[in-house]
Amino acid sequence: MKSLVYFLSSSAKDLLNENLEPFLSFLNLVFKETRFLELIPYHRRIGIKLHFGEAGRNNYLKPEFVHQVVLHTGRKGLQPFLIETATLYRGMRQEAKSHFVLAQEHGFTLPKVLAPILFLDGKVGNSYYEIDGKKISQGLKRISFLINLTHFKGHFVTGFGGALKNIGMGLAAKGGKLQMHSVSIPHIEPSRCNACGLCAKYCPRGAVIFKNGRYLINSVCIGCAGCLTICPHQAIGINWDATPEELGEKIAEYAQVVLKDRLTLHFNFLFDITQNCDCFPKTEEPFMEDVGILASYDPVALDQASYDMVKPKLKSLYPHLKPERILQKAEELGIGQREYQLCPV
């Protein structure tokens, strides 16, 4: 049987102007048809995964939509939390304290969304557990139920960012993000390093050594990537040398680990569809009109359906990329299937 993908055709502006009534009806139908909330025992914690947006950028899922999802979970006697992790690159989202400040600035406050924020990978993104060599955010161990809220958009490496990327990349610890983006360990840039030694004191494996008058990272490095955050001089860098196909495949592999033994419902919001991901540091104009909201138990079918709706215009932006690779790999891993039945609401 084909995977069911529920679809509400609308724009964000229209939904907000109508006090979200069509969105509420859509949520009610999706939760009723999937019985998702009914399958979760009373008073259990549920993680709502989303992206709080980047500093200087307004292209992200708006808190009003998140608020309604939180209300639905709370009415069923569940404990909702908004969950996120640190970024690999530098900026406000590289550690929990400034990431929290950014989330507040973008409207994800407790009075507005009615759910607290949890950063699952610790203060600097280095808290993790391993499964099959993959570094997963430590806090995810305590969460067995997930709602995956994704702002669907383009991406200059993978072609698009959808549900699979939001959980595969988004719930990996910083060291996991390093594994996906790079095939080598971090390095120290001599021109920026002032030999303060903080990285050497921090390193849990003693991989930072002082040799010939400078600090170096040697081969015992486990790739936790915490040193990227704690260095006050931004002297530690990485090689972003994974190919687009490799990155897509690794995201799918991480998504498989995250989803294993977890009950998860996925939503893609095709609003403000921009050429680059929400990590891009400035607001972009959408490259096409809003499409609507899609939901499914199957993230592969969901991303395939979403991609099909934007494919012609996205292909013209990134003719050299192969966005299908992440879908192919996810299907090969048994996460879901690419064949779907669209169920308009």
Image: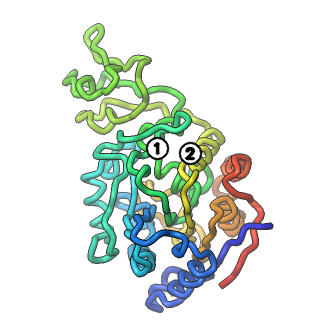
* Residue annotated with mark 1: 136
Answer with the quarter of the image where residue 52 lies. Answer: bottom left
Q: Specify few, some or many for label 1: CA neighbours under 10 Å numbering under 14, 14-19, or 20 or more.
A: many
Q: Is residue 39 left or right of residue 109?
A: right
Question: Residue at left 74%, top 59%?
Answer: 338
Q: In the orientation shown, which residue stands out farthest toward the top?
A: 212
Picture coordinates of residue 311 (x, y %)?
70, 63
Can residue 277 be seen?
yes
Label 1 and label 2: CA atoms lie apart by 8 Å
* Residue annotated with mark 2: 254
Q: Specify few, some or many for label 2: CA neighbours under 10 Å numbering under 14, 14-19, or 20 or more.
A: many
* Along the line of sight, the residue nearer the viewer: 187 or 314: 187
Q: Are marks 1 and 2 in contact (CB under 8 Å)?
A: yes
Which callout, 1 or 2, points at the residue further toward the start of the chain? 1
Picture coordinates of residue 247 (x, y %)?
59, 42
The amino acid beneath tag 2 is: Tyr
Which structural element holds mark 1? Answer: strand
Question: Residue at left 44%, top 66%?
Answer: 60
Q: In the orientation shown, which residue stands out farthest toward the front?
A: 41
Picture coordinates of residue 197 (x, y %)?
21, 23
Which structural element holds mark 2? Answer: helix
Picture coordinates of residue 153 (x, y %)?
56, 62
In which quadrant will I find the N terminus? bottom right
Can residue 319 be seen?
no
305 lies above or below 90: below
Q: How many marks?
A: 2
* Along the line of sight, the residue nearer the viewer: 225 or 49: 49
Q: In the orientation shown, which residue stands out farthest toward the left?
A: 196
Answer with the quarter of the image where residue 3 lies. Answer: bottom right
In which quadrant will I find the C terminus? bottom right
* Mark sitting on residue 169: none
Q: Is residue 5 left or right of residue 238?
A: right
